[in-house]
Amino acid sequence: MTNATDNTLDNDRLDTWMNRRLDELLPKKIAEIEASRTPSMSIIATKGTLDWAYPPFILASTAAALGWEVDMFFTFYGLLLLKKDLDAEVSPLGNPAMPMKMPFGPKWFQDYSWPMPNLLMAGVPGFEKLATGLMKKTFMNKGVATVEELRSLCLEADVRMVACQMTVDVFGFDNSDFIPEVTDYVGATSFLPVARKSDVCLFI
Amino acid sequence: MTAIAERLDARGMNCPLPILRTRKAINQLAAGQLLEVTATDPGSLKDMEAFCNQTGNRLLSSNEAGNCFIFLIEKA
């Protein structure tokens, strides 16, 4: 009986001691583990227009520059961003918040947002080409890289790019339409485990 | 003071190019060597700080001169 009480006392003291030690040691240990770990990001790119091509490639290249591991999964219209000849265009139609900017003239003129009625954008042939040209020029003037440049910078920095096999089939693409750096043609089942382990996961 | 090993002219470049070029330039350096970056992107003030925090490289100084921002980075 006496022994049992002693043991309980010992256990209680041991627990108290261990808790105190853990409180002292754990934060440092966790910080050490955190510091030695490589952060990771996965991006699901689903849009193929010029305006939507920028965010995934800007984020991926920047993350790679920070030393993160980056995986990109291209599906639906996002597949167009993997094509050898990147010909992404921007459509002002149904893009109501898109400011129309002029890439030439004095600063006040360039900064002005031209109100473009949707009807005009929908009805005038060649309007998308015009809007695309204006956007590309404005981006160039502001020193922003082209989508092609950003994509090559991503590849240079070992960003992994995989394509969704199902949408490749659905849209009738051929693997030869895409850049050879595409590491794999897979399904959601293969990508989700990658996404699960990443610190940042974005659907764009 | 250690001499600057490499100078990067990132003037006129906009986000994220200054950071991407900085990363590239730093990769070419040996630990302890210095890189000087000149940029015009106002966002680079915060971005360069965040970049150095994330990558462990040391941002020795960050100055504004005229329309430019000048950063001195020591490779970790």
Image (spheres, coloured by chain):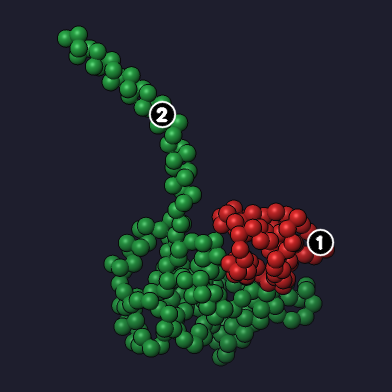
Chain colours: A green, B red
Q: Is residue A110 at all visible to an observer of this figure?
A: yes
Q: Residues within 10 Å of mark 1 (few under 14, many from 20)?
A: few
> Mark 1 to mark 2: distance in Å?
51 Å
Name the residue that disc number 1 marks: B65
Q: Residue at x 38, y 88 (%)?
A: A176
Q: Amino acid at mark 1?
A: Ala
Q: Amino acid at mark 2?
A: Arg
Q: Does residue A200 lie above or below A111 as drawn?
A: above
Q: Name the image quarter holding the N terminus of chain A.
A: top left
Name the residue that disc number 2 marks: A21
A19 sits left or right of A147 in the view: left
Q: Does residue A57 lie above or below A67 as drawn?
A: below
Q: Residue at x 75, y 55 (%)?
A: B1
Question: Residue A172: where, in percent of width, then height?
Answer: 34, 87
Q: Does residue A90 lie above or below B47 as drawn?
A: below
- Secondary element at tag 2: helix
B7 sits left or right of A45 in the view: right
Question: Residue A189: where, in percent of width, then height?
Answer: 28, 67
